[in-house]
Structures are given as structure tokens and as C-alpha cells.
Image (cartoon, rainbow, N blue to C red):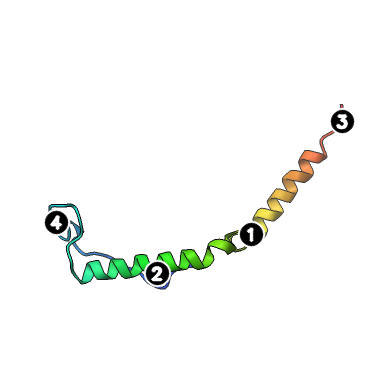
Amino acid sequence: MLTIPNQSSVAKAYQEFGEDDRMKPSPYYDRVVDVVEELVKFTLLTRDVAPYLVDRYSERKEAAAQLSRRVALPSL
């Protein structure tokens, strides 16, 4: 499983937004921006290899079993 090695939470988030519905400048804001930037970087790094990263044995096995059942239907 691929995860970004960063996380953020905002205590009392309702207090961290201004009248314009934007987050006020603060260390919380800086941390959220850091996390989002890291998520974008990991997305760019992994985008072209997504088919490889999400290929799972159990799903291939299940798909093969479904295909076998479909082609093994009795003829009329």
C-alpha cells in the first residue's frame, strides 16, 4: 500500500476560517499545504505506474474463475 508519510489535522477547524471561507494564515494552514503538496508529488510519481500498483493477485484469481465459468457454459 502506498501512503504519503505526512498527515495533518486542524483543532477547532471552525475557528481557522475567515469570513471569505478561506483558511486563515497559521501554522495549521502551512501544515495542510505541506500535506497537499506531498500528495500531489506522490500522485505525479505514481500516476504512470498505477496499473502495476493496483494489480492484485486475488482479483486476477477471481477474474480467471469468472472467465472459466463463462466459457464453460454448456452448449444448447
18 left or right, relative to 29: left
* 53 vs 56, nearest the viewer: 53
Frontmost residue, 2 versus 29: 29
On the image, numbered disc 1 is attached to which residue?
56
Residue 56 visible at all: yes
- The residue identified by callout 2 is 38
Query: Disc 4 marks which residue?
Result: 18
Task: Report, in whole angstroms, how far the alpha carbon at label 1 lies from the one at label 4.
Answer: 45 Å
Tag 2 secondary structure:
helix
First in residue order: circle 3 vs circle 4: 4
Mark 3 lies on residue: 75
Q: Label 4: few (<14), some or many (≥20) within 10 Å?
A: few
Residue 34 in the image: state x and y as whole percent.
32, 70
Rounded to the nearest whole Å, what is the CA distance between mark 2 and mark 4? Answer: 25 Å
Do we see residue 1 in this rendering? Answer: no
Which residue appears at 18% of the width and 52% of the height?
Answer: 21
Q: Which of marks 3 and 2 is in front?
A: 2
* Mark 1 touches mark 3? (CB < 8 Å): no
**Where does the C terminus fall, quadrant-wise?**
top right
Classify mark 1: residues with Cα within 10 Å, few (<14), some (14-19) or many (20+): few
Q: Which mark sits nearer the N-terminus, 3 or 2?
A: 2
What's the amino acid at mark 2? Glu
Q: In which quarter of the image is residue 54?
A: bottom right
| C-alpha gap between disc 3 and disc 2 | 55 Å
Q: Residue 65: x percent and y percent?
A: 74, 48
